[in-house]
Image (cartoon, rainbow, N blue to C red):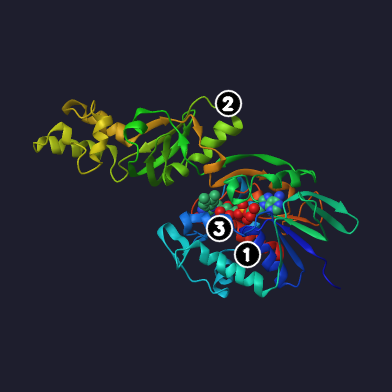
Amino acid sequence: MAKGLVAVVGGGAAGIMSAICLARVGCPVVLCERLDQLGKKVLASGGGRCNFSNVSLDPSFFHEEDRPFVEGVLNRFGKKEIDEFFRELGLWSYAGEDGRMFPISNRSATVMDVLKDELERLKIQIEYGFDADVIQKSQNGFELRSKSGKKIFAEKVVLCAGGKTYPALGSDGSGYALAAAFGHTIIAPVPITLPIVVKDPWCHLLQGQKVKARAASRVDGMEGEWLLGDVLFTKYGLSGTAIFDCTDAVSLALNRTKDARQVEVVVDFVPFMSEEELFREFERKLAHGFKASQLIDGILSPKFGLVLKDYLKTDRTRELAKLLKKRAFKVEATRGWNEAEFTAGGVAIDEVNSQTLESKKQPGLFFAGEILNVQGRRGGYNLAWAWASGAVIGQ
Ligand SMILES: Cc1cc2nc3c(=O)[nH]c(=O)nc-3n(C[C@H](O)[C@H](O)[C@H](O)COP(=O)(O)OP(=O)(O)OC[C@H]3O[C@@H](n4cnc5c(N)ncnc54)[C@H](O)[C@@H]3O)c2cc1C
């Protein structure tokens, strides 16, 4: 029997993957994208390099509560399958720092090139400028209506409209309303993996300084995991990968729970030494005849002297070591949706079948990618989730 049309809403990583995998098993597919271009977020990802996967795609790199659900998907389409998929399309890649995978060209456009080649080879119909406004049940499936009044009738619908971050790249959370119309619970979305607003003299005086450091969130005294990366002082506060990695707890405390009294990030500016070793290093330098004002030379940029002058004293070396190993910054706010790389929250996963990604509320409706309340770590896990979940629907 001929298969009915499947409408895939959203031409990002998950939607493209889903369209390709559905077409490969013989389903007629229409890929509906509101913009005039596919994969804008893929193009922007990884600073234009597209960190599209990771050598270790284990569910432990996803939020604790999501792991059983993620496992169901990765067991069917995991690291090996993602590698094979892209190799088959002719994409050459390499594993960089921390197992992050990049295209060999170091250009995200290369990833989009091979995906577009495959969409073309499979002759997949693409409806650009189709901004899905209403999706409702019709007699034999679904009726999709765009903002401009265009209609598409399909037997099944795959909703891959993404999260709410970087609306300029296409997704602004409109997919949540489409899912909610079928009775789905939407876990309040919050922006994560983003810079933070901190009103602290250090940010003002050190603006533009970038340090290799470790950082952790601290919400009402509860410290999160310490992760190594960059910390960048900016006009408004703090940025850099080490800060991005602790914004999960920070953003949830500020935006979702809202009852946290003290939301901070704590930074270790000398991650390659313990506090005791740092103290002994200061003492060694002083014993060797160096001046107290020269204590941080060779460890941090001289600019740090501006914020440490009260501590660069012979009798304050213990306090200096302590401060540099754990400096707390009070977080006023996050920089919001326009600067976030990822959305925490979305369609509740307990309302979706983890084997097929079909809605438990509405047969024939499927979800993939960032629209679901699944959170991976920075490092290629979110794109890997988009590829894997998109592919599983095709299977
Ligand atoms: C700056 C930046 C850098 C990133 N870097 C990385 C990285 O290096 N590695 C990594 O793993 N992750 C990275 N991420 C996260 C990752 O890119 C996303 O998680 C992933 O692209 C999500 O894919 P998606 O297909 O689910 O959603 P999206 O990519 O957001 O795609 C959704 C698509 O749906 C379309 N759409 C939305 N609503 C409608 C509608 N109503 N009708 C029709 N179309 C609609 C949008 O225009 C868009 O094209 C980055 C994100 C950002 C913002």
Residue position marked by numbered label 1 in the rendering:
77
Is residue 287 at all visible to an observer of this figure?
yes
Tell me the residue at 85%/58% (across/down): 141
Q: Quadrant of the C terminus?
A: bottom right
Q: Position of residue 53 (x, y in %)?
A: 52, 60
Residue position marked by numbered label 2 in the rendering:
259
Residue 394 appears left or right of 45: right
Q: Quadrant of residue 388?
A: bottom right
Tell me the residue at 18%/26% (across/down): 315
Label 1: element kind: loop
Mark 2–mark 1 CB contact (< 8 Å): no
Q: Nearer the viewer, residue 337 or 273?
A: 337
Ligand 1 within 8 angstroms of badge 3 C-beta = yes
Residue 314 appears left or right of 81: left
Mark 2–mark 3 CB contact (< 8 Å): no
Residue position marked by numbered label 3 in the rendering:
42
Q: Which mark is residue 129?
A: none
Q: Earlier in the sequence, mark 2 or mark 3?
A: 3
Crowd band around label 3 with a 10 angstrom C-alpha radius: few (<14), some (14–19), many (20+)? many
Q: Tell me the amino acid under the disc marked 2.
A: Asp
Q: Tell me the amino acid under the disc marked 1.
A: Phe
